[in-house]
Amino acid sequence: MMEKHDYFELTEKLLYSYPCLKLNLITLNQELMNFEHDNIKGIDFDRVNVSKTYSISKNTEDKAVLNIERIDSIKRDILRLKTKIDMIERSLDELSEIQRKIIDLKYFKDESRDCICFSVNLSPSQVNVLRKRAVHKIKLCFFGLNALNKDCPRLQTILL
């Protein structure tokens, strides 16, 4: 079982990686389109006279199978990535406007603490408190009761 700080750190890693995850989703979708349009999926026996004996070379079969497997793999990756991105976006909807802005500036735009404080017109300590509360909310959206039980061990006996 993860420790309390592990959930917090993992949540921060997910937030820092969010912009790259969105870019990766675009890349995977483009790769999928390229594979589906440019590569051999199979052979249409009605249209193609592949040889005098209608035998198909092993290389052609292997390439078609590999392309189908690669397309399936890309589709699985896209689904997993969309799930993570949706999870992050839904958790961000639970934040107040100011918390959302702090998270956006810190994790998505990688702004300095001074820049964040100036943008939201708050002191560094106020920004830090709001940031921690926001990450805590997001952490609960990601990990649910597991993260909550680590925050409040006595709560585990009440909930179970």
Image: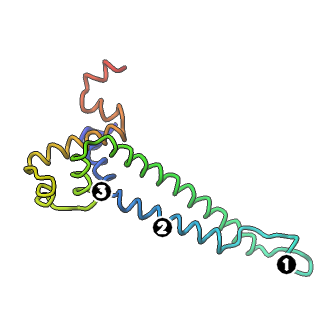
The mark that comes first in sequence, 1 or 2, is: 2
Q: Secondary structure at mark 3?
A: helix
Height in image: 72 above or below 2? below
- Crowd class of label 3 (few under 14; some 14 to 19; many from 20; radius 10 Å): some
The mark that comes first in sequence, 2 or 3, is: 3
Q: Which residue is mark 2?
A: 27
Give the quarter of the image for residue 132: top left
Q: Secondary structure at mark 1?
A: loop
Residue 69, which numbered label?
none
Residue drawn at (14%, 48%) of the image: 127
- Crowd class of label 1 (few under 14; some 14 to 19; many from 20; radius 10 Å): few
Which residue type does callout 2 highlight? Thr
Instruction: Tell me whether circle 2 and circle 3 mark residues in contact (CB < 8 Å).
Output: no
For the C terminus, the image quarter is top left
Residue drawn at (39%, 44%) of the image: 90
Q: Observer-nearest residue: 150 or 93?
A: 93
Query: Label 2 vs label 3: CA separation?
Result: 19 Å
Query: Label 1 vs label 3: CA separation?
Result: 52 Å
Q: Which residue is mark 3?
A: 16
Residue 50, which numbered label?
1
